[in-house]
Image: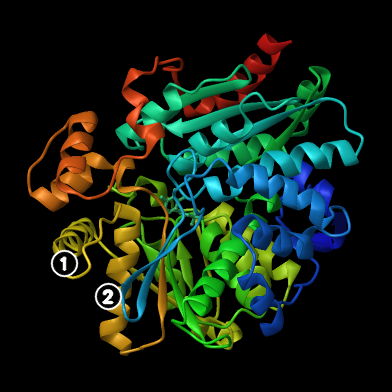
């Protein structure tokens, strides 16, 4: 499978080089030159396999011929052995509603689904390309990607990881997770600014030839662990297909029946993977895009207008506090019939004017598969509390997944659609103990560790082990810098390491 740039279809590259480079030279994102298909018969076969086997099977379709099934299986087996049990259990909430829990990995957020696999793909891709220098992974994080990338890449040979996060824009647990990161090849730094500032700086660095040259002299080549990297997205397609297999196998649906997925969205990577699964032939009725108060995606789907000139809110679902959803570029590419000039124009408009508009008529034939909605803070809290108190099926949602559940409730009220629906659950509630405890108890406790203990007392759910141990770990990284100093911080890290 070859990969092409969303901004230039003629720029075709191998999958290993797409993974190593992360982003295309023209600033576009790599997408597969075509979509491999998955048939009902293959779904039937996948039902018999375990998750690492299912994931390797799906990955092979996108990464062949550079990678063989056996290679990929060795990666997925090692990656998912770091999870606590089934990597993506599907839990039944009621007759038509299911929750796919993607947070049983080492950092308790869904980013682990891909970031445990990516280091294997990246190391192997470098080898296949004959690269000898070191790789410097730059990460901008809204909270969860950073920690998952640090865990995935710590002490991986030939790589270094630098993570930038908004110092006042992540939850206390997310911050502690990153500040206490272990490993000899890692660096974490807070910035005064929000996630978009961090992401913009990282994107600028990737596009800057001068920095690339300087890093090259220091023996480094840049790569990305953000969901702009194809190696991040590809493993995410697998769990959509896997959850479908689980529903068939549990006789909740028949093979061929359609399902809905509800995805709490920020950078649009997760739901895009669902869209790709659908393009492969997975029977999906609706992809429901859920946003918090930063509802730029909701407005886009409902009006065709993507406008970042708006107030930015810090919410209790910080991993979705994003205004520039990078992966929407990949969807635009598909919606426009793979029109690279169209995408380039829209991205230039966004950069120069802070908004773009698409004529809904142009893409109406493809849009109905999406539904978009948002939930404000109060509604999200009410949802956490409502489902926790539910007598038959008590369930403890984290704030991100609660946004998804809220939007699904609205969708259901509006449409009466009885299609079986999977809520994609992206984080453990224990990553956000202060807000979750306050939602279920009505009491506020500022200390995250105390809130964690209280939450465990009143819920049936145990604290994930890595979060339980957090408070005993030493802080290693507490530096906070101005957003304009991100470039120089990267260079100075590379110089120090030399
Ligand atoms: C990253 C993240 C999201 C948003 O996912 P995108 O792929 O960026 O849309 C939602 N919830 C949690 C907990 C996350 O960490």
User: Label 1 belongs to which residue?
Assistant: 390
Q: Which of marks 1 and 2 is nearer the N terminus?
A: 1
User: Label 2 belongs to which residue?
Assistant: 409
Q: Which residue sits at x=56%, y=21%?
A: 187
Is disc 1 in contact with disc 2, using a CB cutoff of under 8 Å? no
How many numbered circles does the render carry?
A: 2
**Helix, strand, or loop for circle 1?**
loop
Q: Which residue sits at x=32%, y=81%?
A: 95
Crowding near the residue tagged with mark 1, few <14, some 14–19, many ≥20 C-alpha atoms within 10 Å: few
Image coordinates of residue 328 in percent, x first then y, are 57, 63
**Helix, strand, or loop for circle 2?**
helix
Dividing the picture into quarters, in which one does residue 297 lie? bottom left
Please determine whether, in this image, residue 382 is positioned above or below residue 282.
above
Residue 60, visible in the rendered structure: yes
In the depicted view, which residue is nearer to us: 414 or 442? 442
In the depicted view, which residue is nearer to us: 179 or 425? 425
Crowding near the residue tagged with mark 2, few <14, some 14–19, many ≥20 C-alpha atoms within 10 Å: few
Q: Which residue sits at x=44%, y=59%?
A: 265
Q: Which colour scheme is used?
A: rainbow
Image coordinates of residue 279 in percent, x first then y, are 66, 77
Quadrant including the C terminus? top right
Dividing the picture into quarters, in which one does residue 97 lie? bottom left
207 left or right of 435? right
């Amino acid at each position: 499978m070859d990969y092409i740039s969303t901004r230039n279809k003629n720029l075709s590259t191998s999958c290993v080089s797409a993974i190593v480079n992360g982003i295309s030279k023209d600033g576009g994102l790599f997408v597969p030159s075509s979509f491999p298909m998955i048939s009902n018969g293959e779904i039937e076969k996948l039902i018999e396999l375990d998750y690492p086997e299912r994931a390797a099977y799906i990955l092979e379709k996108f990464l062949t011929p550079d990678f063989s099934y056996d290679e990929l299986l060795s990666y997925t087996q090692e990656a998912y052995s770091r999870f606590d049990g089934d990597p993506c259990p599907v839990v039944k909430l009621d007759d038509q509603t299911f929750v796919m829990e993607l947070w049983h990995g080492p950092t308790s957020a869904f980013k682990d689904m891909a970031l445990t696999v990516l280091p294997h793909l990246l190391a192997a891709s470098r080898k296949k390309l004959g690269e000898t220098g070191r790789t410097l992974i730059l990460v901008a994080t809204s909270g969860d990607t950073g920690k998952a990338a640090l865990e995935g890449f710590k002490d991986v040979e030939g790589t270094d990881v630098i993570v930038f996060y908004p110092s006042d824009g992540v939850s206390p647990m997310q911050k502690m997770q990153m500040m206490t990161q272990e490993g000899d090849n890692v660096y974490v730094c807070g910035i005064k600014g929000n996630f978009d500032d961090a992401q913009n700086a990282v994107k600028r660095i990737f596009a800057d030839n001068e920095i690339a040259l300087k890093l090259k002299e220091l023996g480094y080549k840049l790569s990305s662990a953000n969901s702009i990297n194809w190696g991040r997205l590809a493993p995410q397609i697998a769990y959509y297909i896997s959850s479908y297999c689980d529903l068939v196998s549990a006789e909740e649906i028949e093979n061929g029946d359609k399902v809905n997925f509800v995805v709490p969205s920020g950078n649009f990577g997760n739901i895009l993977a669902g869209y790709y699964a659908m393009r492969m032939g997975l029977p999906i009725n609706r992809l429901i895009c859920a946003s918090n108060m930063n509802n730029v995606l909701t407005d886009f789907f409902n009006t065709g207008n993507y406008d970042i000139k708006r107030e930015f809110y810090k919410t209790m679902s910080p991993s979705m506090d994003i205004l520039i959803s990078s992966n929407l570029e990949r969807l635009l590419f598909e919606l426009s019939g793979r029109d690279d000039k169209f995408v380039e124009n829209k991205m230039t408009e966004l950069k120069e004017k802070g908004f773009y508009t698409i004529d809904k008529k142009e893409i109406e034939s493809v849009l109905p598969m999406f539904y978009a909605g948002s939930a404000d803070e109060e509604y999200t809290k009410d949802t956490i509390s409502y489902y926790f108190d539910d007598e038959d099926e008590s369930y403890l949602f984290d704030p991100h997944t609660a946004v998804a559940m809220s939007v699904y409730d609205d969708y259901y009220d509006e449409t009466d659609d009885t299609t079986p629906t999977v809520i994609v659950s992206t984080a453990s509630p224990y990553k956000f103990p202060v807000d979750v405890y306050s939602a279920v108890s009505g009491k506020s406790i500022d200390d995250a560790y105390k809130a964690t203990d209280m939450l465990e007392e009143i819920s049936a759910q145990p604290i994930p082990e890595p979060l339980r141990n957090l408070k005993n770990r030493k802080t290693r990284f507490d530096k906070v810098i101005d957003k304009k100093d991100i470039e120089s911080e990267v260079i100075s890290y590379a110089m120090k390491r030399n």
